[in-house]
Image (tube, helix red, strand yellow):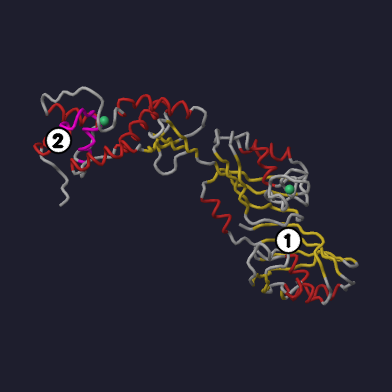
């Protein structure tokens, strides 16, 4: 039966048993009765119990915590020293208990029944946390701390788990031939070889690397990852309102950077190549939101026709495809890295913007995930209906720009 209180005699009985085992500090004595009363610290509670046991004066190191609670200030100072290099608003203290202390705890729980006890970790985390709060004015946050301070009792050291900073924005890519993220060299897989000119990469630069170069130092971060809301082809520009993304800055030393100034810095450094807009701080959940978003896309497509088609035929084909559901088997050019299956994607609107001779320019609004190059060419019948089949003229994408990504 679970009880929520003990008589004074019972408390003293348990306390005598504990003290009988050897010297014990007030923190460790008090926390055995932590759940009986609140409003005082375990240290004070231990002192009160000890006074009730007249004559229980003890010398020596506490056998239970091995003197840990006599060193709270030392632990707090060591933590503060490490925290000093970081900007943060909130923190949390955690403990990795050593084997010896774990064994001692278990011994104690057998002795006392442990129903009213608070674990050593909880007391240690709180006491060191209080000291850091007092010294810095920062607050303990159990839900989303900026930094977790880990007291590692195995190696008598402090570790910091610095949470990433997340920034949402949209990017525009003005130049073709730039992938969204770094592509490792197919030949050497990143090690560096003659084929990649010893860069380890297929392309000299990527949207991710260009943004990273301008912002990683501003945050004093160790690394940066770009999470895009889908990705355009390497040879497609990203125009219009831009593509939503979230950057994740790893182990940042600063987390309050002026984003307007940062935006200007990125855009000046990448003038004519890349720009970012709408930067704002967000939570980690935004990464999943933009990754899973089924965003509609608008494209501008320049199409090359195998032979001349007249205006009426072009308008007829565009009208037939506007609003159509497209069945698309995984394109030949990506089937080596994607599952071979049939996707159904809708075209919301297809418009003829211009035409001359053997080229025409289209505006296409469709579901995300539609392969545009194959919609135009038909991919040897793997995409149906296609622009090529509908028009009755072989057609191919010559230029592709993404104009809008709806989020
Ligand atoms: Zn102790
Ligand atoms: Zn290589």
Q: Which one is nearer the viewer's eye here, 155 or 27?
A: 155
What residue appears at the point 78 percent right and 70 percent down from the top-left corner?
377
The label number, if any, that marks residue 299 in the structure image:
1
In the rendered view, would you say 336 is above or below 70?
below
Q: Which one is nearer the viewer's eye here, 171 or 8?
A: 8
Q: CA distance from mark 2 to mark 1?
A: 78 Å
Q: Which one is nearer the viewer's eye here, 159 or 200?
A: 200
Q: Position of residue 364 (x, y in %)?
A: 73, 65
Q: Is residue 319 left or right of residue 141?
A: right
Task: Give ligand 1's quarter of the image.
Answer: top left
In the rendered view, would you say 251 is above or below 324?
above
Residue 215 appears in which quarter of the rendering?
top right
In the rendered view, would you say 69 is above or below 163?
above
Q: Is residue 48 left or right of residue 302?
A: left
Secondary structure of the residue carrying tag 1 is strand
Q: Which residue is mark 2?
A: 17
Magenta span has 29? yes
What residue appears at the point 69 percent right and 36 percent down from the top-left corner?
265
Q: Residues within 10 Å of mark 1 (few under 14, many from 20)?
A: many
What residue appears at the point 67 percent right and 49 percent down from the top-left corner?
181
Secondary structure of the residue carrying tag 2 is helix
Image quadrant occupied by the C terminus: bottom right
Magenta span has 177? no
Q: Position of residue 113 (x, y in %)?
A: 19, 44
The nearer-to-camera label among 2 and 1 is: 2
The residue stretch that appears in magenta: 19-35
């Amino acid at each position: 039966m679970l009880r929520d209180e003990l008589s004074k005699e019972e408390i003293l009985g348990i306390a005598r048993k504990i003290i009988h085992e050897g010297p014990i500090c007030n923190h460790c004595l008090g926390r055995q009765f932590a759940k009986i009363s609140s409003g005082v610290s375990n240290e004070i509670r231990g002192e009160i119990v000890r006074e009730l046991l007249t004559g229980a004066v003890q010398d020596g190191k506490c056998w239970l915590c091995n003197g840990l609670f006599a060193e709270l200030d030392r632990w707090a100072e060591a933590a503060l020293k490490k925290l000093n290099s970081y900007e943060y608003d909130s923190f949390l203290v955690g403990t990795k208990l050593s084997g010896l202390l774990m064994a001692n705890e278990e011994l104690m729980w057998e002795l006392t029944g442990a129903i009213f006890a608070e674990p050593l970790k909880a007391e240690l985390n709180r006491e060191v946390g209080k000291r850091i709060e007092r010294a810095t004015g920062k607050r303990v946050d159990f839900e989303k701390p900026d930094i977790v301070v880990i007291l590692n009792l195995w190696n008598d050291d402090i570790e910091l788990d610095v949470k990433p900073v997340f920034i949402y924005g949209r990017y525009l890519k003005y130049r073709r031939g730039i992938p969204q993220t770094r592509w490792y060299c197919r030949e050497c897989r990143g090690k560096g070889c003659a084929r990649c000119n010893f860069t380890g990469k297929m392309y000299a630069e990527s949207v991710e690397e260009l943004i990273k170069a301008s912002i990683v130092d501003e945050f004093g971060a160790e690394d940066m990852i770009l999470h895009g809301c889908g990705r355009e082809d390497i040879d497609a520009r990203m125009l219009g309102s831009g593509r939503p993304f979230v950057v994740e800055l790893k182990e940042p030393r600063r987390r309050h950077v002026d984003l307007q100034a940062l935006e200007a810095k990125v855009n000046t450094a990448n003038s004519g190549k890349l720009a970012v807009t709408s930067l704002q701080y967000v939570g980690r959940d935004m990464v999943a939101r933009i990754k899973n978003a089924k965003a509609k896309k608008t494209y501008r497509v320049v199409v090359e026709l195998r032979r001349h088609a007249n205006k009426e035929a072009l308008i007829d084909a565009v009208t037939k495809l506007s609003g159509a559901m497209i069945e698309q088997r995984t394109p030949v050019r990506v089937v080596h890295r994607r599952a071979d299956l049939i996707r159904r994607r809708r075209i919301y609107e297809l418009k003829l913007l211009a035409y001359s001779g053997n080229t025409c320019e289209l505006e296409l609004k469709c579901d995300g995930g539609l392969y545009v190059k194959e919609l135009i060419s038909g991919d040897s019948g793997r995409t149906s209906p296609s622009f090529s089949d509908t028009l009755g003229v072989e057609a191919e994408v010559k230029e592709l720009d993404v104009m809008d990504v709806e989020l």
